[in-house]
Image (cartoon, rainbow, N blue to C red):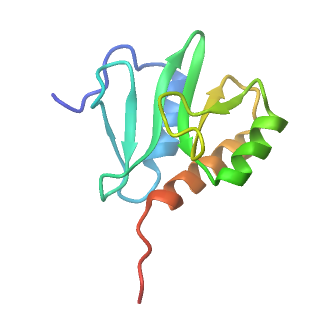
Amino acid sequence: MKNRPPRLFAGRDYQKYRKLFLSKPGSRETFPFGPQVAVYKTKASKMFATLAPDNESWSSNLKCDPHWSLTLRKQYPESIEPGYHMNKKHWNTVLLNGSLPPSLIRKLVDLSFALVSPVTRK
């Protein structure tokens, strides 16, 4: 099966973050970069998150407002860094090791999804 998560992607934490990312309308999980990185895309195939193992925990790349990114990186220097292999201005790498409040992680995921989702006009 092509979109089946590799064995590397297992456990309670993976399932928790996978569920969060897939809770966004029309989102799906893919592995275009190989079995080490799960990529979450919108219905329009725009990437809004990644999930990868990071030592004993997980990390995620999430799109963010450039001004808020700078503030977050100053406030949480051990947990939020410029996006790994991404545009450093628009993406953050968020360490999912329990050091950030769950509400902040949800807010960052919501914002990332909103930033890459097309605006629908009535």
Placement of 50 over or under 95, stated as above or below: below
Q: Quadrant of the C terminus?
A: bottom left
Residue 100 or residue 34, whichever sits in front: 34
- The residue sitting at the right extreme is 75
Residue farthest toward the left in the current orientation of the protein: 1
Above/below status of 98 relative to 122:
above
Screen quadrant of the N terminus: top left
Residue at screen point 65% across, 51% down: 66
Q: Nearer the viewer, residue 13 or 109?
A: 109
Tell me which residue sits at (31%, 57%) in the image: 43
Q: Nearer the viewer, residue 97 or 83?
A: 83
x and y percentages locating residue 52 in the rendered image: 47, 23
Q: Residue at x 51, y 40 (%)?
A: 87
Q: For this view, does 66 lie left or right of residue 72?
A: left
Count of numbered tags:
0
Q: Residue at x 39, y 42 (%)?
A: 40
On screen, residue 57 above or below 32:
above
Whole-percent x, y for residue 8 in the image? 38, 14
Query: Which residue lies most toward the top here?
Result: 55
Q: Quadrant of residue 121?
A: bottom left
Q: Tell me where residue 117 appears, x and y as whole percent.
A: 43, 62
